[in-house]
Image (cartoon, rainbow, N blue to C red):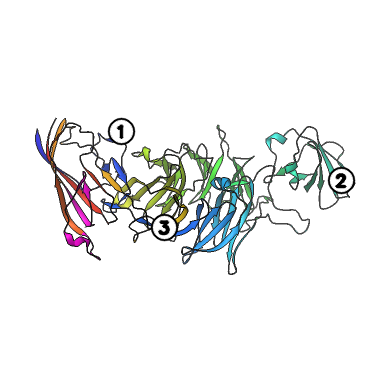
């Protein structure tokens, strides 16, 4: 038996799962809800949400920053792109994507241009000009001499043994009838392109599963036999479109497509619509297929120091500088994998690439080792696996050092991370309703919420004490099970619990409201700073339950720097 005084003055590990409750070296909590871990290691009540706009349906949020002083927020709804500036709707653009397609829509931005890709839709370009916003088709550059386009051509696996018989067509000298030796064509092949007889052809008419009509710009010579050496355009309605996109070393990068999931296409340098590999000159286009023992789908491509390629089974990188057709240094570094069924954009956090793993149960930090040669994929959820429950959206606010991850159940896991100060703390945000999407624009964190009144666009604000001007929220922080003198005590008696607070106006400890000076409630008062305490009676034999719990539901500022227990124990 012994008396003890135990102070916890850092909560830097945040929410910790029960399997780590016996550890002495973790400055964490068993519950952390609607509170953040601040830079000094203390706790503060999260900011409230300020209303921005009502939405007609759920939306996916995307940041669109044209310059340091020109930021826009895109809200993708069913068939529309809503453009917001400083919280005001300034443009409503018609868009081709229904709500069901939003989860796999990826994008890459360069200055005032953003390109969207989806495996089932031809890419689109959103452009900001002095005249406003426009959404147009992405097209491959055209060669004036023969009207061919600079699109890559592929020999797909299911066409490997297909031969084409070319015969004249009555429509004219530039037309031909193409007949395959087995069923191959579908109506989706119309307007698609082939590379055949050294020429590009456009399919103009579907006749049957073995017969189509095609057109080429110029005369051709009929072959004497069926042709086996032919290719299809890599991207089309029949073969699918790029799945992922990025810009890297002034090249446009497409990663994977529906029918060629492990392909990487890089445009010519500075000519982002030109994917002609030409003769392999340094600035010409590049094509790579990832080769490994496992079949894999490219989930996303990320431009960092190297070109990172995140697939369904692992993480690759191309480290060549400069990247040319003759010098492509590519290898697989880790084998974690990413979610392929939806796009959860990787985030740049403190120089590393943070992505959600293929299982959806952890978040990894992809960073080079000290020698700058190999990548490691550190698990950021190692102590807090329980916070990951089917993530659906993610965003990072570098100004507040917070990573926001929206879950399918409408809650949001939040990582307060500041490596320089030793902070890596997960917690959970809840609101009256559900969080649906999140994005960060110009240092502001925006969310889409579903409330009893419908869908809303809202913003976290230090000036908001509640959510959307009408919804209060409670907060909770509870201790880890107490270990005293390096032991698991069998019995405990807590005589007093004290907390050191900063600018605090309301706080409950273990269900009891602590006494604060009356003048803290005066308008304009910064709140009370100092020590508060409650007295506790009784002996505890349940030493797994937390010995203290900070909580409250009043719309007042709360910051707790440390918590101290006074009592005795036996082992």
Location of residue 102 in the rendering, given as x and y in whole percent from the top left corner: 55, 48
Of labels 1 and 2, earlier in sequence is: 1
CA distance separating discs 2 and 3: 65 Å
**Residue 19 badge:** 1
User: Of the residues tagged 2 and 3, which is closer to the observer?
Assistant: 3
Task: Find disc 3 in the rendering and name its residue.
Answer: 459
Are discs 1 and 2 less than 8 Å apart at CB?
Answer: no
Closest to the observer, 292 or 42:
42
**Residue 514 badge:** none
Location of residue 308 in the rendering, given as x and y in whole percent from the top left corner: 51, 46
SS class, disc 2: loop
Of labels 3 and 1, earlier in sequence is: 1
User: Of the residues tagged 3 and 1, which is closer to the observer?
Assistant: 3
Question: Which residue, as the protein is rendered here, is positioned at the far bottom?
Answer: 130
In this rendering, would 503 be left or right of 408? left
**Residue 221 badge:** 2
Q: Mark 2: give few (<14), some (14-19) or many (20+) Cα within 10 Å.
A: few
SS class, disc 3: strand
Q: Residue at x 23, y 62 (%)?
A: 526
Location of residue 115 in the rendering, given as x and y in whole percent from the top left corner: 59, 55
Region rendered in magenta: 498-527
CA distance separating discs 3 and 1: 35 Å
188 inside magenta stretch: no
Of labels 2 and 3, earlier in sequence is: 2
Question: Which residue, as the protein is rendered here, is positioned at the far front?
Answer: 453
Closest to the observer, 399 or 270:
399
Q: Which residue is drawn at 41% across and 48% down?
A: 433
In this rendering, would 535 be left or right of 523? left
Count of numbered circles in the view? 3
Residue 366: which quarter of the image? top left
Q: Which residue is drawn at 45% across and 60% down?
A: 52
């Amino acid at each position: 038996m012994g008396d003890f005084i135990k102070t916890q003055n850092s909560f830097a590990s945040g929410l910790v799962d029960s399997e780590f409750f016996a550890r002495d070296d973790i400055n964490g909590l068993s519950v952390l809800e609607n509170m953040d871990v601040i830079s000094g290691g203390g706790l503060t009540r999260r900011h409230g949400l300020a209303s921005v706009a009502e939405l007609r349906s759920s939306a996916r949020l995307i940041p669109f920053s044209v310059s340091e002083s020109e930021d826009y927020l895109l809200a993708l709804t069913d068939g529309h792109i809503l453009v917001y500036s400083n919280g005001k709707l300034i443009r409503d653009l018609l868009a081709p994507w229904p709500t069901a397609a939003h989860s796999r829509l990826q994008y890459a931005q360069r200055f005032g241009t953003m390109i969207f890709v989806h495996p089932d839709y031809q890419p689109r370009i959103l452009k900001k000009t002095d005249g406003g916003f426009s959404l147009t088709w992405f097209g491959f550059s055209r060669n004036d001499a023969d009207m061919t386009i600079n699109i890559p051509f592929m020999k797909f696996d299911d066409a490997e043994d297909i031969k084409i018989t070319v015969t004249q067509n009555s429509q004219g000298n530039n037309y031909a009838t193409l007949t395959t030796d087995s069923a191959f064509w579908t109506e989706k092949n119309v307007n698609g392109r082939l590379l055949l007889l050294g020429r590009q052809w456009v399919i103009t008419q579907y006749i049957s599963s073995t017969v189509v009509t095609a057109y080429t710009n110029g005369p051709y010579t009929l072959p004497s036999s069926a042709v086996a050496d032919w290719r299809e355009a890599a991207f089309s309605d029949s073969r699918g479109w790029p799945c992922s996109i990025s810009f890297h070393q002034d090249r446009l990068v497409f990663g994977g497509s529906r029918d060629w999931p492990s392909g990487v296409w890089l445009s010519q340098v500075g000519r982002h619509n030109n994917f002609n590999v030409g003769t392999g000159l340094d600035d010409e286009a590049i094509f790579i297929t990832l080769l490994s023992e496992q079949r894999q789908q490219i989930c996303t491509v990320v431009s960092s120091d190297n070109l990172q390629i995140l697939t369904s089974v692992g993480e690759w990188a191309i480290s060549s500088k400069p990247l040319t057709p003759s010098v492509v240094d590519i290898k697989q570094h880790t084998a974690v994998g990413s979610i392929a069924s939806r796009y959860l954009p990787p985030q740049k956090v403190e120089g590393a690439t943070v992505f959600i793993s293929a299982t959806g149960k952890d978040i990894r930090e992809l960073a080079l080792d000290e020698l700058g040669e190999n990548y490691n994929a550190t698990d950021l959820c190692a102590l807090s696996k329980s916070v990951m429950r089917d993530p659906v959206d993610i965003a990072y606010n570098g100004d507040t050092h917070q990573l926001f991850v929206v879950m399918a159940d409408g809650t949001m896991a939040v990582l307060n991370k500041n490596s320089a100060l030793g902070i890596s703390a997960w917690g959970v945000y809840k609101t009256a309703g559900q969080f649906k999407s999140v994005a960060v624009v110009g240092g502001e964190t925006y969310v889409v919420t579903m409330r009893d009144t419908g869908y809303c666009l809202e913003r976290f604000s230090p000036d908001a004490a509640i959510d959307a001007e009408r919804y209060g929220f409670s907060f909770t922080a509870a201790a880890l099970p107490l270990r005293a003198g390096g032991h698991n005590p069998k019995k405990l008696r807590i005589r007093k619990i004290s907390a050191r607070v900063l600018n605090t106006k309301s706080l409950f400890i273990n269900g009891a409201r602590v006494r604060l000076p009356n003048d803290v409630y005066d308008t304009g008062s910064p709140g009370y700073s100092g020590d508060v305490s409650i007295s506790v009676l009784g002996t505890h034999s349940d030493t797994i339950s937390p010995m203290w719990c900070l909580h409250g539901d009043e719309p007042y500022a709360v910051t707790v720097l440390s918590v101290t227990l006074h009592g005795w124990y036996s082992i």
